[in-house]
Amino acid sequence: MKIAIAPGVRLFVDIEGAGLVPDGATMRQKPTLILLHGGPGFDHSSFKPGFSRFADIAQVIYYDHRGHGRSDRRPKDEWTLDTFADDIVRLCDALGISKPIVLGQSFGGFVAQRYIARHPGHAAKVILSSTSASLGLARKLAMFERLGGQEATDAAERFWTAPNAATWETYTRVCRPLYSANQPANDEAARRTMVDAEILFAWAAGEQQGMNLLPGLARAQCPVLVLAGQLDPVCPIEDSRDIAAALPPEWATLAEFEGCGHGVWRDNPEAAFARLRQFILE
């Protein structure tokens, strides 16, 4: 379904699981888990079906960022982190959600970090998964070289310094299979993901180049779980360590996973989903 969050702005939203459930002689309110997908330019489909497992303990909200996927097209000047972060609040207002648990994966983690900075008292908890606070090209290139040699390093450098159709084609072929330690990048989830190349190239060449989200993390006012794979080439583990260090120590938890790449549940679903369940319930 599409939900209007502002005049002329509708987001595609899918909801899994009841929010209010019978519990003996009373009704119990489950927490709401809001999932922010990666990209930019992608859609929410990579969360399915894996995150269905949390519908027993939370109402799960999937949505496509403004202008992405099945959400309404929007002008380029709205493709900003501030807008995407504020959309979380707008969506919650439209659906009557208070104190959500917000999970941001990769680009969704950029959005979640800006959300922490702009709306520090809004969430009950935040999960920053396989994400970075800046472009951090040197770290990316070092990891791509470690995992894929000079060919991967060259392809990554060409794309991240000049995002376009030609550099993306090579990057997709050479670098994206290195994202996951155990699964190819062209698995079923990747094949069914909608990709808007215009958003991808514009954002990667624009705001992402000068992005620095670390200062805003000091404003966090809720528990934040930083979830990271030690073999992630595009959001290297050092980036997650920097994020955890930038958060107030009383709120930050860093969970590192050996042998895992980008999106740790893709490489070690049993351990990753168990850690997420623990964080949602604790």
Image (spheres, helix red, strand yellow):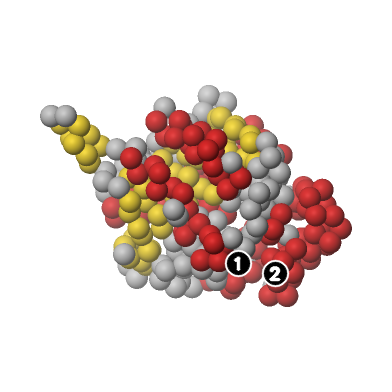
Q: Residue furthest left?
A: 25
Circle 2: residue type: Trp
Secondary element type, mark 2: helix
Instruction: Name which residue lies at 80% across and 54% down.
Output: 148
The crowding category of the residue bearing disc 1, from other C-alpha atoms within 10 Å (few below 14, some 14 to 19, many at least 20), is: some
On the question of residue 118 being in view, the answer is: no
**Of the residues tagged 2 and 1, which is closer to the observer?**
2
Instruction: Name which residue lies at 68% across and 75% down.
Output: 165
Q: Nearer the viewer, residue 135 or 190?
A: 190
Tell me residue 208's x, y (percent).
65, 58
Quarter of the figure that contains the N terminus? bottom left
Task: Identify the residue position indicated by label 2 in the image.
Answer: 168
The crowding category of the residue bearing disc 2, from other C-alpha atoms within 10 Å (few below 14, some 14 to 19, many at least 20), is: many
Task: Identify the residue position indicated by label 1 in the image.
Answer: 200
- The mark nearer the N terminus, 2 or 1, is 2
**How many marks do you count on the picture?**
2
Circle 1: residue type: Leu
Q: CA distance from mark 2 to mark 1?
A: 10 Å
| Quadrant of the image occupied by residue 99 | top left
Quarter of the figure that contains the C terminus? top left
Can you say whether 229 is above or below 68 in the image?
A: above
Quick check: marks 2 and 1 in contact, CB under 8 Å? yes
Q: Residue furthest right?
A: 150
Instruction: Name which residue lies at 22% across and 39% down.
Output: 21
Q: Residue furthest top?
A: 250
Secondary element type, mark 1: helix
Can you say whether 62 is above or below 113 in the image?
A: below
Instruction: Name which residue lies at 26% across and 46% down.
Output: 18
